[in-house]
Image (spheres, rainbow, N blue to C red):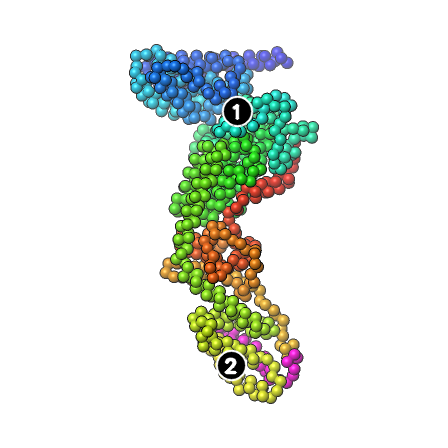
Amino acid sequence: MSMQIAAGKHIQLARLPQCRKFYLQHLADVLRQCNLLSPAAIQAIINGSGRYFDARAAQQQQSSFGDEVRGLTSSHISLVPEDDLELNLRLERLNTQLSDAASTALWKTQLRFMTLLGRPDLGKNQNPIGPAGIVEGLRLFFEQAGASSLDEKLDLLDRVENTLRRELPVLYEALEQEMSRMEIEPTQAGIIRAQESVVSLTGAAGRAGSKPERAASNTAASLPDDLLTLLAQKARRSDAPEPALLDQAALENLWFRLEQMSTAPKTTKPASSSFLTDTSPRLEALIPELFAPPSAAIGSPPAALRPVSALELGIPAATSEGQTIDAVGLLFDMLFSAPELPPVLKQLFASLQVPTVKLALKDRSLFTRANHPWRRFVSVLGRCAGELGDGSGGSDGFQASLESLVHDLVKHSDHAAAFERAAQSLEQQLEARFNQRLQAAAVYLPLLRQIDRRDQAAEAISILLAQMNIGTLPAVLQSYLRQDVYRLLERTWLQEGPESTAWAARLANLDKLLWTFRPKTDGEERKALARELPGVLQVLKEDMERLKLSSDQQAQILDACFALQTRAMRSGTPEEKASETSVGSGLPVAAMIDGQLESGTLILHTRECRPPLTATPGRHAFAPGQWFQLTLAGREQNFCLCQKSPASERLLLINAPQSEAFTILSHLLAAEVAAGNIRLLGDPDLVSTLLQRALAAARQAPAKSP
């Protein structure tokens, strides 16, 4: 077996000169495209790059992680003349810029060089064909052309850089395809068990911007939260009491991959499922978008909202890191499926998924600390659902402002402090927008005062009708009194006032009508009924005409009145007659009625209940700044609660972009929210809600096979 392994390694290494030749030939072609370098200069750069390739290929062991991070910079910090120091700094910056420009293609070649060199610990700055080799070639060229001035050298670097930034990714893609043709497979990062030599994440968690590192430890870090514990129980075998941990090289590769996912184009193509059965899965199957041709990403549709998965990243779910990644994936799965969040907001959250993984790998208190900056920012961003849900957020640049804020946050989002600053900034924006809506609400106050007076009239009329005990009347008369006569009474109360003679006359006419329905037990009462009845019927007819009731409605009401008045003329006890006339109809079913008041271009929508619902104290505490979604005037709209009327429990909600407002009593709003007719947007503790949903989903999911 060892002979077979040695033979396989020998075959792989035999392909190293072919890769070197392919790389240097294509690099020379790229340098010729600059049209700025002589053949001698190009040859000098190729020689320097070749030396770098040979040195990295011959290196048997990766340097320490600290050296890896420092890269080439530390090797050139020395007491040198100022011009040389400035040139060195410019070359180091060029190295960084070229690495960033070709990061994805460079990473793919690094994975194949890990296999080619038999070094799964190969760091990104140890890649034989990395931009650092080109920088070394430029150093050699400048040394050999020592007569040039610093300004000329810097100017040449600026001009060469544009060509290199454009062409290097193409070169690396071509080399990666050539290595694939040579059957040099990409290396999959390995893992080790917890009882082997491992290190904890705590060493790196406290250093801003640092990658997770391992230091010696005998046990894995304990899982801090119910969600992680549940995932661990489902992912691990019963004979594995502690989770596995990634070794340092695998952890660095994971971290580098996460950095690429933050910036690289994504596709909607799902990962191949072949890795579920393969004993040695190919990395192309685990992360297909990383090895997709560059042309596939150009012009492709936006990425689907897919939660991150440890398995698709090539990280086994039984590892501590895998459980953290899957926990984040579950949280974002709940975000993506939350019905209360609009699509544009879900896209913003999607861009934070990978940065959240990076933060959680260093600081898993993200799952447990109620005041964690990440949780605060997610909840504040969730409050923007009302601002964006109806598309109004894009009309004044708010959506663009959010996108810019999230874009800036992604750059530094592996620091908890960055989320804290972003939350503060967003809260200030939301407060400013709310203050603008308060100003917009001021113009609706005269209309609100009109409705307040109507509320006062409604309360007085409801009390009046309750005292008149009309529940024993036929249904047609109950409907007439509770709805039609109600409108007459309301109009009189609002126009003339409750102290006016018109209001008193209206009450006297209503009382006389109800008197004609009551049984008359002696001759004097029957004579009085016969005397008053024509005038009562005349007033009734005038009121029905004033209300513009149809002839059929009028006939039904008159027939019902005639039947009651005829019975009232008969002799008998009041109890008997009341029993005969009672229909037991009770109160009609409450119905919500939409209306509106207009004043110039202002529209104040209303939603009332007939008959009025009784308020439930203490169950409808809504706060200014909350957003609600409702269907009004045939379209779904979002309204922000701005203020409560000082004279009643009436709420005023504003949808400023449409110059419309909505008003409703607080107990009616509570009833509508409970019935699902109105949706409350912006969960004040969105993360807690997501965690509860994620826990429920994790409990229902089947345990993963070992």
Identity of the residue drawn at 42% across and 48% down: 433
Identity of the residue drawn at 44% across and 42% down: 426
Between residue 550 and residue 570, name the one nearer to us: 570
Residue 301 visible? The answer is: no
- Range covered by the magenta-colored residues: 549-576
Q: Mainly helix, strand or loop, the magenta region?
A: helix
Quadrant of the image occupied by residue 464:
bottom right
Give coordinates of residue 389: x percent, y percent: 47, 47
> Callout 1: 10 Å neighbours few (<14), some, many (20+)?
many
Q: Which residue is mark 1?
A: 252
Identity of the residue drawn at 33% across and 20% down: 154
Taking the image as shown, residue 407 lies to the left or right of residue 195, namely left
* Residue type of the residue flagged with mark 1: Glu
Q: Is 568 in the magenta?
A: yes
Is residue 391 placed above or below 583 in the rendered structure?
Answer: above
Query: What quarter of the picture does the N terminus occupy?
Result: top right
Between residue 15 and residue 510, name the one nearer to us: 510
Give coordinates of residue 523: x percent, y percent: 60, 88
Identity of the residue drawn at 65% across and 83% down: 572
Between residue 25 and residue 260, name the one nearer to us: 260
